[in-house]
Each structure stands twice: as structure tokens, then as C-alpha cells.
Image: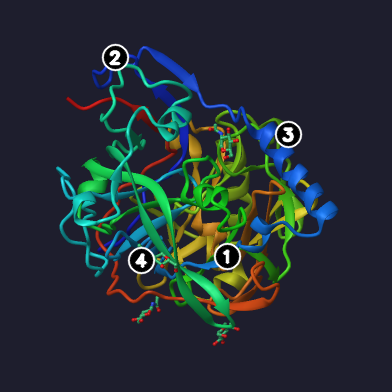
Amino acid sequence: MEFRLLLRPHHLLILILYVTSSFQFGSATGVLRVQRKFSGQRQLITELRAHDVRRHGTILIENSRGAVDLPLGGLGLPTATGLYYAQIGIGTPSKNYYAQVDTGSDILWLNCITCGHCPKKSDLGIELTLYDPKGSSSGRLVSCDGSFCSSTYGGDVPGCLSDMPCEYKVQYVDGSSTSGFFVNDYVQYNQVSGNHKTTTANSTVIFGCGAQQSGDLGSSSEALDGILGFGQSNTSMLSQLASAGKVRKIFAHCLDTINGGGIFAIGNVVQPKVNSTPMVSDTSHYHVTMKSIGVAGTSLKLSTDIFQTGDMRGTIIDSGTTLAYLPEDAFKPLMNAIFSYQPDLSFQTFQDFLCFQFSGSIDAAFPKITFFFENSVELQVYPHDYFFENGDGIWCTGFQNSALQSKDGKDIFLLGDLVLSNKLVVYDLENQVIGWTDYNCSSSIKIHDEKTGAIYTVDAHNLSSTARSLDIGKFIAVLIICLMFHLFH
Ligand SMILES: *[C@@H]1O[C@H](CO)[C@@H](O)[C@H](O)[C@H]1NC(C)=O
Ligand SMILES: *[C@@H]1O[C@H](CO)[C@@H](O)[C@H](O)[C@H]1NC(C)=O
Ligand SMILES: *[C@@H]1O[C@H](CO)[C@@H](O)[C@H](O)[C@H]1NC(C)=O
Ligand SMILES: *[C@@H]1O[C@H](CO)[C@@H](O)[C@H](O)[C@H]1NC(C)=O
């Protein structure tokens, strides 16, 4: 039997920032853990601003912040593309680029014209475009002595001479990586201007020009032009647009496994309403606090230790990951509870996936899983979410054991598209909360537009592509991504 499966290995989390004090690649002499040093301060700024708004009514900058509608394509099922991507315009004249949307990483980067091992074509059926800083009249190199570079690397960049570029490297656990240099150019996006309506707006944004891609990022299977990191660090496009006063630091996604694509919007979502859980402070990614796991309404008996948060522990929400990974001490009891509903199944494993033959309705035959979070927020995961069909009546389990994927990530709950799809997920960075609700991602949401004070309807998109499933079983576990500074020679 042929087993067709495609998994997206990019669990895009930047966990460690290495600063090399010499210019040799790999000769890191100082290792700096990224702490959210400024999170306290940032919170304070938000509070102060809220306070100011109350006192003075409105402030000009508040009025200029519009909502953004990012057209989305892709299909997050493991048997389809396994990812979601958005279209953005960059440069003068503007060209269209397709980038994977990823809440687990912090920069936007695109394959660059000088690229060594960039894919030339994509099996996703989209046309790839290389970014050429010289081909855009507004493209500028970002120098290593500028404030962006020094604040990204936490101080003066060792050995920096003026005119040297500010470089970056992002590395993934599957061995793939991207490195290059930062550039500054116009990004064009769709600003919401009415119900079902957008107009083009622009802003300059600093992003990575990928000069060298390795591993999976160089292959043409599911290749895109780059990755659009929606992390909360200052380097993300969202943070840059927010500090330019163009948008609020709130965004939402609704990833549609039924029709593909979905909704990805920046702005204050007023409908549907979501219940929110606090983000864990002092972590660099979208960490939340899970409290327990229920199977058809009954809580699993689990040690509370496994829900502890911290470095390489706790629960991470990551749209750049296809599946969902649980620590072994939660994974095994959960699997036992799920399969106790159908004790007579016979299992087969395919490429590390636990699969079984089943005819009939899996939603009727298996239990609903509920993840409980702080603030009594629940995330419901249905059998049709956590199982995926792989050919005639063969169903496979999307939940994975973190311990089998990576030593570093063995204690992490990593919640990817498997459990995030078909829900509206709202990331409110201003209030440091994340919320969600079950939702029809082919429909529309309502966003408050600060520019006019109106409430506008934003529709779902499905960027067309000839996406098809591929024979790939690359399986990556937990990600370790390093943002590395080094100079090329
Ligand atoms: C991030 O940006 C904010 C506001 O622009 C600034 O106050 C803060 O110092 C920056 N944080 C870092 C780590 O550079
Ligand atoms: C950016 O937007 C402004 C205002 O709409 C417009 O005049 C300008 O031509 C745009 N620039 C680019 C590079 O798109
Ligand atoms: C989801 O919304 C779309 C667009 O409004 C609609 O055509 C479709 O029937 C809805 N699906 C369900 C299951 O309600
Ligand atoms: C997305 O839209 C395209 C046409 O625009 C369609 O061919 C494709 O089937 C849609 N994707 C899904 C998963 O339905």
C-alpha cells in the first residue's frame, strides 16, 4: 500500500540567541538565552497608553491604526500541503510573494536573488519569486551598526564596520536553516476599508534576504518564497507595523481544513467573541498554561508536574507546526483513553504514525478531547481533527509523543494546526492573552477599524494553487531555532 503523507517540519521557535564574538561561523563563544527582558516594560507601556487614552479621549496614533486582511492559502492536513501561506507585496515596483505564516518564529524572510540553494519551483503550484534588493528602487541594506541590528543582538555587533550588513541565521531541528542579511523595503498589504473590501497600504519593514537555505528549505516540495513569522519579538513584521503606528498588536487566524486557506487578519476582532487565557510572561513564544486534559468529559489522571511552564516546558501555540506533540506522560494515557473506545482495532504503523482500518463515523466512535487552560478556557479537539484519513478507510493519529521527536523538546506540549484549525484564534499581545472558539473558517469575522470607528466584515480566502499531496515522510520534532549572528566572509 502506498502511503502518502506530507508533514511540515518547521516548528519555528527561536529559543536561543547565539552571539558569536568572532566572525567564524559556528565559533560561538557566548551563549545568551533570550529572556523577555522587556516584557515588564512593554506591559507598562501598554498600560500607560491605555491610561492616556482614557484621559485624553483619543490620541492621533490610535486613530491611524487600521485592520489588515492577509489573503491565505494552503491546507494544514498532514496528507495535503501541511501548511498555510499568505500573499504579500514587497518592493517598488511591488511584486507578490508567498510566505508560510508562522506564529512560532520572529522574522519575515524571503529567498533572495543571490541565494545559493533556493528552490526554483514549488510543488504547491505557486510561482516562486526571488527578492532582489537592487531590483527594488526602495530596497536598502540594513547595516550592522544600525539600531535594528544592535537591538536584535542586544548590543554592539562585534567586529562591525559601517557598510557591513546585519546578518541573521535561523536554524531548525530538522537540520534545515536559512541565513542571509536584513534589508529594508516597502511591504504592501490589504488594509480593510469596508465590508468585504480592502485597499492597498504600505509600510517599510525590515526583513531577511535569504542568501543560503539548507535542508528542507532548499527543496521544491512545498516550497514557498519564505516564512512570515508572527512572533511577538520586535523583529517581526507585526511588531514593526505596530511600532510605526499602522496596526494594533492583535491578530487572528482561522485555518480551514475544509476548503483550504481561511482568515488571517490584524486588528481587534469583535465577532466572534473568544474566551482568552493569559500568555505566560518571560517566554519568547506563544506559551499558555494548560491545566488538564479531558476525554469525553472525564479528566485524565496526570501528574501536575507535566503542566509546569518554563524553558522547554509548558504549552506552545504554533501555527507553523502541522501536528500536535505531547509529553510522553500525557501522550500515553491519552492514547490509552482514546483507543479504549474501540478495543478491537488492529494497528499498523506508517512512518511513525499509528494507523488503523476503520469504516464508519470516527466522530461517533471516538471521544472528544478537551484541553483545559488557565482561566477555564477549553480547547475542543474532535476525532476528525486528531485523526486524518490516509487512503481507503485507513486512519492515522495526529497526536505525537514529544519524547520521540527531540530530547530538548520532550517535555513540551506543542499545539500545531492539527488542533488550531477550524477555530478562530486571537492573539492579543497588548493584553497578553490568547483566545479561541470553534468557527467556520470559510465564513467571515468582524473587525473594529480604529481609523473610522466602524466595524467591518473580513472574509475568508483560499489562494488558489494546484496543491496536491506528496510522498514525503520527513518528520521533525521539536524545533530548536537559533538566531545567529555571524558575518560571511
Ligand atoms: C522593542 O521595541 C520597543 C518599542 O519600540 C522598545 O521600547 C524596546 O526597547 C524594544 N525591545 C528590544 C528588546 O529591543
Ligand atoms: C505607499 O503608500 C502611499 C500612500 O498611499 C503611496 O503614495 C505610495 O506610492 C506607496 N509607496 C509604495 C512604494 O507603494
Ligand atoms: C461555512 O461558511 C460558508 C460561507 O459562509 C458556507 O457556505 C458554509 O455552508 C458554512 N459551513 C457550515 C458547515 O456551516
Ligand atoms: C481553494 O481554491 C481553489 C480554487 O481557487 C480550489 O481549486 C481548491 O480546491 C480550493 N482548496 C480546497 C482545499 O478546496
Residue 139 location, x and y as percent? 28, 51
Query: Which mark sits nearer the N-terminus, 2 or 1?
Result: 2
Dividing the picture into quadrants, the one containing residue 71 is bottom left
Residue 449 location, x and y as percent? 65, 70
Name the quarter where the C terminus is drawn.
Answer: top left
Do residues under tags 4 and 3 come within 8 Å of each other at their CB atoms?
A: no
Query: Which mark sits nearer the N-terminus, 3 or 2?
Result: 2
Q: CA distance from mark 1 to mark 4?
A: 18 Å
- Secondary structure of residue under mark 2: loop
Residue under label 3, please give it.
304
Residue under label 2, please give it.
22
Residue under label 1, please give it.
383
Q: CA distance from mark 2 to mark 1?
A: 52 Å
State the residue lying farthest toward the right: 55
In the image, the residue with mark 4 has its CB under 8 Å from the nearest atom of ligand 4: yes
Residue under label 4, please give it.
80
Q: Amino acid at mark 3?
A: Thr
